[in-house]
Amino acid sequence: MIEVKNLTKSYGDKLAVDNISFRANNGEILGFLGPNGAGKSTTMNILTGYLSSTSGEVYINGKEILENPIEAKKEIGYLPEFPPLYLDMTVKEYLCFIYELKGCKLPRNTHLKEICELVKIDNVYNRMIKNLSKGYKQRVGLAQALVGNPRVLILDEPTVGLDPKQIIEIRTLIRKLGKNHTVILSSHILTEVQAVCDRIVVINKGRIVADDTADNLSSALTADHKLIARIDGPREEVVKVISSIPGVVNVLADMQREKGVWEYNIEAVEGTDIRRELNKRLWSRSWYILGLRSSELTLEDIFLKLTMGESVNEFMTKKAEDLESIDKEGGKA
C-alpha cells in the first residue's frame, strides 16, 4: 500500500506540489495523471525516494520514505520513462547486476527466468542490450523493476516504444501484476489508463483535482440531459426541427458519419427528457435515428475539463466546431 499525507514540495518560491494526499491500496492499479508542469513527475520522484519533500509523509507498506528509506525502497520496483539500462551488457548480465544491487535473496536463476518469461524477453536473454529494439529495451526496463518481487510497482510510461501487439501484452501483464502488487501507473495515453487502472488521480497546478474511477468521474461531470444522436436526414432541416422541440436549448451538427447521416449534439433543459418527442418528429418526416446515446465524457474529456477549467458545454462546442471545420476542409479537397 502507498499512502501520501499532506505532501508538499517547493523550489524556492515555486510550489510544485501543494499539500496533496491520496492512497493506493493493495491489489489496486492507480492511474496518476497530470499535464506538463502539474507536479506529477515531482510526486513520482518523491514516492520513489529520488527527491525529498519539503513537508508531508509518504508511506510504502507502512515504511516512511524519508525516515526509513532503505527498507521503504526495498518495497518498490520502479520503471522510469527512460529505463536505466547499461547498453554494453547483455540482458543476462544486466539483470544479474540488478539482482546483486538490490540484494535479492530469491533463487537467482529461477527468479530471473520467471521474470524474463513474464515480460517475454527470454528469447533475447544473451543478447547485448544496445542491439535490442526500443520495445525490447522497454521490456528489459520492466524486468529490472520486477527483480526482488517488490510489493509496490511504480511505472512511468511503461508502453513507450512498443508496437500495438506489445502494448496489449504489457497492459495484460500490468493487470495481472495488479492482482498481487500495488501499482501506480503514469501515462500520457489516456485510453491506456482507462483500460488498465482501477482508479484515477488527476493532479493540476500542484493540487489533486480528482480521485475516483473513470466511470464515476464521467457520471459526476456529465449532464444527463445531453444527447448525441446519429440521424439520417437533411442536416439544416434536422437542426431546425430538433431546435423547435420544447426544452431543447442547443443543437450542434457534428461531422458527417456516412452519406446523408450526421451526428448531432443536443442539449436540453436539465430534467427534460426529449427522446420520445425527438423520435416522433423525425419519424413523421421519414428521417431515421440510427444511434442515440447520452454524451458521457471520455477520459480525454474529463482530463481536459479538470485541467483546463472548461465547462462540458464549452468543450463539446469546441469539439463539434473543430470537427465541422475538418469536415469542410476535407470536402473542399
Image (cartoon, rainbow, N blue to C red):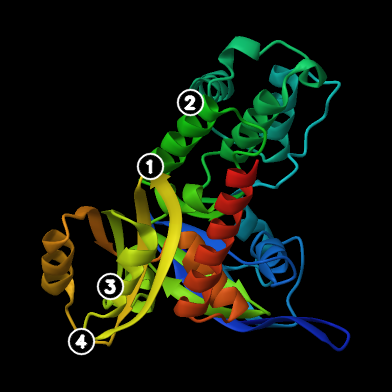
Question: Label 3 is placed on what type of residue?
Answer: Ile
Image quarter of residue 173? top left
Contact (Cβ within 8 Å) of mark 1 with mark 3: no
Residue under circle 3?
242
Identified by mark 2, the residue type is: Leu
Tell me residue 246's x, y (percent): 21, 85
Q: Horizontally, is 250 left or right of 186 in the view?
A: left
- The answer to whether one can see residue 157 in this image is no
Residue at 69% across / 18% down in the picture?
92
Q: Which mark is residue 50?
A: none
C-alpha gap between disc 4 and disc 1: 32 Å
Give how far apart the Cα atoms at labels 2 and 4 are.
51 Å
Residue 306: x %, y % from top left: 54, 76
**Inter-mark Cα distance, 1 to 3:** 20 Å
Kindly identify the residue that appears in the image at 56 percent across and 79 percent down.
208
Closer to the N terminus: mark 2 or mark 1? 2
Residue found at x 74% / y 20% = 93
**Which tag, 3 or 4, sits closer to the chain's start?**
3
Residue denoted by label 2: 118
